[in-house]
Amino acid sequence: MCDLSGQLAGAGATKILAAFGAEVLRVEDPATQGLWDALRGVGPYVDERRGVNFGAGFNNHNVGKYGVTINMRTPEGKDLLRELISISDVVCENFAAGVLDKRGFGYAELQKIKADIIYVSNCGFGHTGPYRDFKTWGPIVQAMSGLTFTAGLPDAEPAGWGFSYMDHMSALYMTTAILAALHHRDRTGEGQHVDLATVPAGIAMLPTEVLDWTVNGRAATAAGNRADFAEMAPHGIYPCAGADRWIAIACRDERELGVLAKVLNEPELSSDRFTTLEQRVRAADELDALIGDVTASRDAATLADDLVAAGLPASMVKSPSERIDDDPDLAAMGLFPTVTHPDMGEVRVEGIPMRCSATPWQITSAAPRLGQHNREVLVDLLGHSEAELDDWAQRGVI
């Protein structure tokens, strides 16, 4: 795979495929020190060292890839990229629409290099339509797609879904697109251009809200921690003993509310005024206050264990250390493997959250330093000489 992508949306997709065995050649720009991908230059960091090889986001999303630098502004750089494309199955990128076309690497040109090439582009609004030239980041995509409108507390400004939520989701769509295009090529011999637009991908995450508007003319509202469509009550996050300790509890019906009443030893929860779902939804403020008064004196972990043992969906709200360091299920899955980075030494990275009995994923090598594999790719793979490599490096071609 010739990977021209970056940030989270593109790099996340090729990370998944690399973990399952794809050979991913991550192509970066030496003229900008790779900083088109902003994650190369931002923290968090493992220590006081800074620079393009130390950004945690970049190092997490680019494990298992080869790193090569090619300056596409130069004639020699363009030729080198054409050579890489000629031996690749897939070219993927998440530049703004039209950027690769302007540099002479649009889909029509890629087909001239390799007739059955698969070209997957991933940008906010895709390569067609009135918004194609708009530039986006995660928060903009979420606002345009409607996700932000549905997030937050009632009667407050929208809270958003976190800085890069749609970048992560877009990476999953991009992974699927690449696999589907490869399957089609295996069956027909045909390559194709897959034009992925992140904003519609965000809209696709709101099917019920879209249906409610198109059928009922009813706009979704931000429900906070409550069920979006009043399908459950109680349904929320409640305080527990200690600083910033919380528990998530959701009850589907009156039977589960009865279980909650028993575990909390709060008979008021079994009152006739909470018998039906309609009553509970109408009295949600009172119900939440009643539950919160009881949970505030209880240990979150112990209470969650008691509720789960009684058959009620519940979980303490876990801190990073509780989830990453202390969770036995994630430890058994091996979700946070350790890799050895040439500068930072041993660091933990995020794995792939699935288990495959026949084809398990593997993450054993760290993300590349800028241009780390230039020699392996340009000399060993493409057959150029050491002298050419040195000359290109001196003149900024690589």
Image: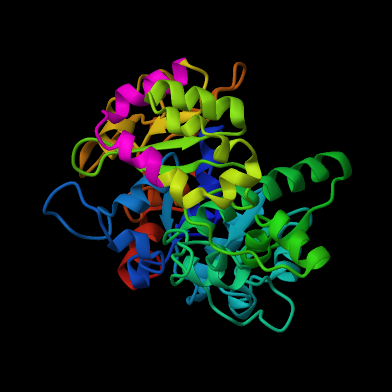
Residue 210 sits inside the magenta stretch: no
Direction from residue 320 to residue 215 in the image, left or right: right
Compare residues 1 and 129 and report the one nearer the observer.
Answer: 129
Image x and y of residue 174, in percent: 63, 52
Residue 95 makes an appearance in the image: no
Direction from residue 324 to residue 188 in the image, left or right: right
Please name the residue shown 19% across and 42% down the image: 243
Please name the residue shown 70% across and 50% down the image: 177
Compare residues 54 and 265 and report the one nearer the observer.
Answer: 265
Residue 35: name its quadrant: bottom left
The residue lying furthest to the right in this view is 188
Image x and y of residue 72, in percent: 50, 71
Residue 304 sits inside the magenta stretch: yes
Image x and y of residue 69, in percent: 41, 60
Q: Which residues are magenta?
A: 289-309
The relative height of residue 73 versus residue 288 in the rendered view (above or below) is below
> Which color mode does the image show?
rainbow
The residue lying furthest to the left in this view is 48
Compare residues 116 and 297 and report the one nearer the observer.
Answer: 297
Give the quadrant of the C terminus. Answer: bottom left
Image x and y of residue 328, in percent: 36, 19
Compare residues 314 and 206 and report the one nearer the observer.
Answer: 314
User: Could you tell me what secondary structure mostly forms the magenta stretch?
Assistant: helix
The relative height of residue 249 versus residue 278 in the rendered view (above or below) is above
Please name the residue shown 52% across and 19% down the image: 311
Residue 326 makes an appearance in the image: yes
Direction from residue 375 to residue 181 in the image, left or right: right
The relative height of residue 151 versus residue 357 in the rendered view (above or below) is below
